[in-house]
């Protein structure tokens, strides 16, 4: 009787051992090729802050629009009427619903009023804004040994000294006492001398004149 009980106990123990081994093998097979403790995922790289676009310097209220100027026209609560236009050589721009509209020779205030008046046929009490995004019609040119020679927009009052400062100043090769503004009015061209050396010494302040559209500033070396 005891031998029979002993045999049963041994058989039962073997069964338990076999079941445990089988379960362990099954678990190992299901987890094969996969780490038990996967490494924590690294955080996503932070998105760089968006760069704010450079703002456009406002033009004076009496600025007169000319050919090649870039304008942005917007109508409040009417996004479909917002447009950006370049003034054509004939002085006109294309405006949604209105077609060609005269822009050259007008200030932004005058052009805004004209567009608003035309849109009253389609929009109740339109609120229009006109912004000069880029000035291309009024330019002065700087040549010679300066930091950054080239064409500069004349969007407001600008003296010759201010222009030189904007261009990075004179180089060592420049003749500071021999600068000239070449100005053409109609068929007449005149040469206006400017002595920068005397100006910085406080001796020739009156010749720091305001520049006009089309002026060419020549710095000799």
Image: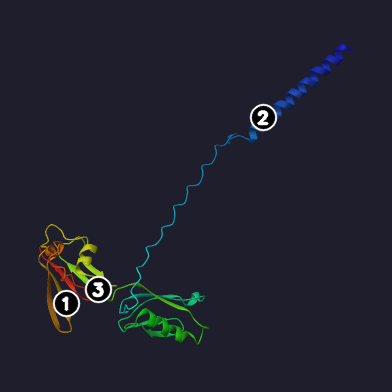
> Residue placed farthest to the top in the image?
2
Q: Quadrant of the C terminus?
A: bottom left
**Residue on which disc 2 sits:** 25
* 3D distance between C-alphas at marks 3 and 2: 84 Å
The reply, left or right, for residue 77 in relation to residue 101 is: right
Against 81, residue 19 (above or below) is: above
Tell which residue pokes out farthest to the right in this image.
Answer: 1
Reading the image, the residue beneath label 1 is 183
Front residue of this view, candidates 20 and 126: 126
- Residue at left 64%, top 36%? 30
Relative height, residue 192 to residue 164 (above, below)? below
- Determine whether 52 is above or below 21 in the image: below
Q: Are marks 3 and 1 in contact (CB under 8 Å)?
A: no
Residue at figure coordinates x 13%, y 74% from the top left = 192
Residue drawn 10% across the image and 66% down it? 178
C-alpha span from label 2 to label 1: 96 Å
Provide residue 212's location: percent of width, then percent of height. 22, 76
Colour scheme of the picture = rainbow
| Disc 1 element | strand
Q: Which residue is mark 3?
A: 139
Where does residue 128 sit, x and y in percent of width and height? 45, 78
Marks 2, 1: nearer the viewer: 1
């Amino acid at each position: 009787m005891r031998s029979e009980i002993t045999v049963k106990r041994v058989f039962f123990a073997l069964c338990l051992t076999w079941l445990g081994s089988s379960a362990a093998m099954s678990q190992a097979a299901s987890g094969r090729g996969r780490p038990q403790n996967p490494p924590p995922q690294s955080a996503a790289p932070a998105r760089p802050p968006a760069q704010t676009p450079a703002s456009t310097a406002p033009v004076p209220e009496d600025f007169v629009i000319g050919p090649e100027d870039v304008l942005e026209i917007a109508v409040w609560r009417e996004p479909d009427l917002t447009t950006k236009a370049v003034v054509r050589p004939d002085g006109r721009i294309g405006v949604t619903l209105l077609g060609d509209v005269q822009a050259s020779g007008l200030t932004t205030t005058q052009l805004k009023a004209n567009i608003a008046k035309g849109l009253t046929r389609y929009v109740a009490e339109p609120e229009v804004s006109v912004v000069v995004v880029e000035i291309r019609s009024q330019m002065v040119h700087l040549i010679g040994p300066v930091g950054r020679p080239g064409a500069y927009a004349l969007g407001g009052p600008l003296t010759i000294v201010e222009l030189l400062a904007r261009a990075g100043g004179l180089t060592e090769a420049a003749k500071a006492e021999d600068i000239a503004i070449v100005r053409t009015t109609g068929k007449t061209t005149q040469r206006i001398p400017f002595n920068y050396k005397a100006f910085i010494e406080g001796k020739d302040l009156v010749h720091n004149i305001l520049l006009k559209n089309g002026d060419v500033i020549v710095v000799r070396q």
